[in-house]
Image (cartoon, rainbow, N blue to C red):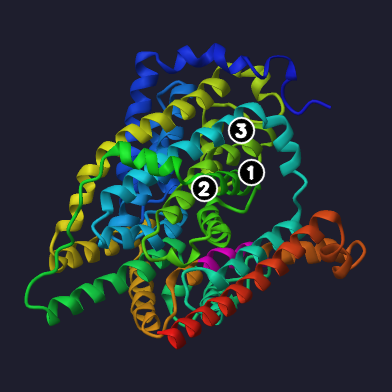
Amino acid sequence: MSIGYERRDIDLEFLYYFGDVFSPVSFGLLLLGTIGGLLLGATPGLSPTMAVALLIPFTFHLQPVQGLILLGAAYTSTVAGGAVSAILLKIPGAPANIATTLDGHTMAKQGKGARALQLSFLASAVGGVIGVLLLIFLTPVLSQWALAFGPSHLFWLAILGVTVIGSLDSASVVKGLLSGCIGLWLATIGFDDIMGAQRFIFHPALGGGINIIAALIGLFAIPQVLTMFAKGRTSSAAEVIEVEKHSIKDAIRELVRRPRALTIGTVTGSFIGLIPGVGGQIAGLVAYDQTKKFSPEREKFGKGHSEGVIAAEAANNAMVGPSLVPLLTLSIPGSPTAAVLLGGLLIHGIFPGTDLFDNHPDVAWTFINSMLIGQVLMCIFGLYVAGLAARIAQVPQSVMAAVVLGLAVFGSYSVQSSMGDVYVMVTLGVIMYFLERFGFSAAPLVLGLILGPIAEANFIQGSMIAGATDGLGAYFLTGTLNIVLIAVVIASILYSVWMELRTRRYISKEEIMG
């Protein structure tokens, strides 16, 4: 059975179209999309999906392949550009950059902002190149494998993500899980997608549910702003973060010395990006959690450890290529941004699917090649920007607080042009400010908010299928893939509990000896 194109030239066919990427117009659009994507990604509230959607109207008068080159470059560089605000301001440029804030911002506060940015762009480039190579060489095999995931498997994947919450940026597994449960509850606000029933709508601003971008900005930005204002009132001089110079050569050496974080991030991002409907926003979080669990220096995570930044950013860009596998071969978008790219293809009369590589090989391969070259360009421009952007950390906190607050309001309002999103953003931010005082963290809460709709939608779909087949238990609890995923879920919970108990014993022993 053929799913698109024969194996005859798959290893060489893409090479025939490399020259098309370097035509003056195509390469100019590639540069424009890369630089613009970095700037858009660094702006809080402008996610990769929004960036690609904003650029679609500019592709109407371009050739199909030229339009796709612009959109693909913006996609890859926006994902990487989100690390800039995540590291310097502790405001993730997109949900994919949440995990980057956990160690990246701490490094910036320690004067290592340039180093953190350099590592993030280098790791993004490595992960991104490998992800695109997977898209080139393994598309037929991976697309068939991705198609094997049904509602029950996606449900257990979402639950696996929830179990990560217990050990994610929290001193306590219980507090991490409670934060995640709050996020899961917030995800239910609005209208039930299946039944259309209202749930917890006690204010008109909540009629459409809680927008993930507004929540993301509020939960991360507002506590920062309030903390900055509080420091400004209690200190006589404005606090300025010192920025140490860091050479690119040293950053490359450090990346080479961290193969574990780079490998786990790349593999995790590629795996998650391939699965339709899961979304790349959890790739960095899962990669960060797994790297932390396998690292002998796990106690350094959350305190400015470079492995956390490397794993998160490698995963974020590694998922880009595989997320396009089901789109290009099965017409199934693997992520929200891939869905927007699908619209860009359809506008030009190109229908992805089984015959895309046979009927339009020039469009498909030139687009994929441009993404490969775009990863290299993104790294080059990103490293140049890193040295300049790190100076942002030297701005006095009183000024920074005002700027961050303005960006937060702009980013929240721009998503849907709604003041309701601004109210939600401010409310969640103030609540998070007080929750942080009791040891709760924003990252598990956001992860619950992201995974809630995925788990609920797939559970309801699976229940409907189960009702027409062998029943709920048989559908969700049997089958090799289900059993494997359930075992991983249980192992993840037990490991988190074991690690917390081990850490407590270690601290108690230190206190006794000290």
Is 290 rendered above or below residue 491?
Answer: above
The magenta segment is 447-456
Give residue 436's position: percent from left, percent from top: 38, 79
- The amino acid pointed to by label 2 is Ala
CA gap, disc 3 to disc 2?
A: 14 Å
Q: Nearer the viewer, mark 2 or mark 1?
A: 2
Q: What count of labels does the image hold? A: 3
- The amino acid pointed to by label 3 is Leu
- The amino acid pointed to by label 1 is Leu
Residue 253 placement, left or right of 266 = left
Q: Nearer the viewer, mark 3 or mark 1?
A: 3
Residue 326 placement, left or right of 292 = right
Residue 348 placement, left or right of 456 = left
Q: Is mark 2 on a helix, strand or loop?
A: helix
Q: Is mark 3 on a helix, strand or loop?
A: helix
Give residue 294's position: percent from left, percent from top: 58, 58
**Looking at the image, which residue is at 68% across and 70% down?**
195
Q: Which of 391 and 158 is in front in this view?
A: 391
Give residue 298's position: percent from left, percent from top: 50, 64
Report which residue position mark 2 lands on.
315
Q: Does the magenta run of residues contain 434?
A: no
